């Protein structure tokens, strides 16, 4: 790692790490059809199936690996933003619900939209761009005061009060063992749903990518003489950084996120082409643009308010045992399930 940093510098090493992690995530997410929205739809309809199995495998594999690394002291997440900085409970709850609603309206979360767009889905491309612009507006733009006001309603200080390990008094090893048991159950459930070995392996690969993200950024931070943020896969922040780097008249500042987004796009596109699944998809009568755009607005603002997207909070923050991340992903489930339930029973919601 020291040699890599000497050759590329901290920023270059982070960008390369992001690219590698992104390639792995893009390939495995495309192969497994990893999608939180699809999992919530199955639960809402009372028919747990393959999409739920994929999400459970990805989540439990990430949690098992990350907490296993922490238990063996090869990874320390105590100083990460997800744990050490002040968090917002109100932001996690409100933003999570908003994200969940938008996710159903747009038929995909931020990561799923990026994967689909890379496979030729123009609906996902347009929706993802709107999501990214709204996220930027909520972060530093005209919507930032509203986000900050909502986030300040109920905050929690960083450290032990935001760390589920400290709150519940359990060791990282205990979490790793429990998560591993959950992973075995999820794999058994997937097999019962007749998922292929390729898809089960790819679902686990999504969790591996999340754990690898934490591990490589931590390794770079340990080897660097500069302060390097330890992070893993998330999409709203890196997507806005990547978009701004493409359109702003300034030098690109390399980072893990700058490498991550194109890595995911290349990985997903390559996987789709290799499997013959790459094809152009457009808006149509049964896929009204206005519904997708409303969903994008809700997801863009909601992700910044909640502190992460379905992957950033759900898998990365969740595997780090961040209290606010768990609250955020729980709220995403609630918002998504309620929205789909309402859409099925009140058809006019589908025409919004």
Image: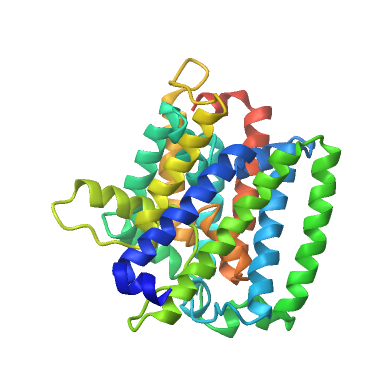
Q: Is residue 303 visible?
A: yes
- Quadrant in the rendering for residue 145: bottom left
**Side of 263 where 167 appears, left or right:** right
Image quarter where the N terminus lies is bottom left
**Side of 288 where 253 appears, left or right:** left
Residue 143 x %, y %: 31, 55
Residue 203 x %, y %: 66, 47
Point 46% across, 55% down: residue: 20
Residue 90 x %, y %: 52, 65
Q: Which residue ends up furthest to the left in the rendered image?
A: 249
**Side of 82 where 65 appears, left or right:** right
Q: Is residue 261 above or below residue 127?
A: below
Tell me which colouring the rendered structure shows: rainbow
Q: Is residue 305 above or below residue 322?
A: above
Point 42% across, 48% down: residue: 263
Viewer-proximal residue among 102 and 124:
124
Q: Which residue ends up furthest to the top in the rendered image?
A: 285
Point 17% across, 58% down: residue: 251
Viewer-proximal residue among 276 and 183:
276
Q: Is residue 314 visible?
A: no
**Side of 34 where 254 appears, left or right:** left
- Quadrant in the rendering for residue 16: bottom left
């Amino acid at each position: 790692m020291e040699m890599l940093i000497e050759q590329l510098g901290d920023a270059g090493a982070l960008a390369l790490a992001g690219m590698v992690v992104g390639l792995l995530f893009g390939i495995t997410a495309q192969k497994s059809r990893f999608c939180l929205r699809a999992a919530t739809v199955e639960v809402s309809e009372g028919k747990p199936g393959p999409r739920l199995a994929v999400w459970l495998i990805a989540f439990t594999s990430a949690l098992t690996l990350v907490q296993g690394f922490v238990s063996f002291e090869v990874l320390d997440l105590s100083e990460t933003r997800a744990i050490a900085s002040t968090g917002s409970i109100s932001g996690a709850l409100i933003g999570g619900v908003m994200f969940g609603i938008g996710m159903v309206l747009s038929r995909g979360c931020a990561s799923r939209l990026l994967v689909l767009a890379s496979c030729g889905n123009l609906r996902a491309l347009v929706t993802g761009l709107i999501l990214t612009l709204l996220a930027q507006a909520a972060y530093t733009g005209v919507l930032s005061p509203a986000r900050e006001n909502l986030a300040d309603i109920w905050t929690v200080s960083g450290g032990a009060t935001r760390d589920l390990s400290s709150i519940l008094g359990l060791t990282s090893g205990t979490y790793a063992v429990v998560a591993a048991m959950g992973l075995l159950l999820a794999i058994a459930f997937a097999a019962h749903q007749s998922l292929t070995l390729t898809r089960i392996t790819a679902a686990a690969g999504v969790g591996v990518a999340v754990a690898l993200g934490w591990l490589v950024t931590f390794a770079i931070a340990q080897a660097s003489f500069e302060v390097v943020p330890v992070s893993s896969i998330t999409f709203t922040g890196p997507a806005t950084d990547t978009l701004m780097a493409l359109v702003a008249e300034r030098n690109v500042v390399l980072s893990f996120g700058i490498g991550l987004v194109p890595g995911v796009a290349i990985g997903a596109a390559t996987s789709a082409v290799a499997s013959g699944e790459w094809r152009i998809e457009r808006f149509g009568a049964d896929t009204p643009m206005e519904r997708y755009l409303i969903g994008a607005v809700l997801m863009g603002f909601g992700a910044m308010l909640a502190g992460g997207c379905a992957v950033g909070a759900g898998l990365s923050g969740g595997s780090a045992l961040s209290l606010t991340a768990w609250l955020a992903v729980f709220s995403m489930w609630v918002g998504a399930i309620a929205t789909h339930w309402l859409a099925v029973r009140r058809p006019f919601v589908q025409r919004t």
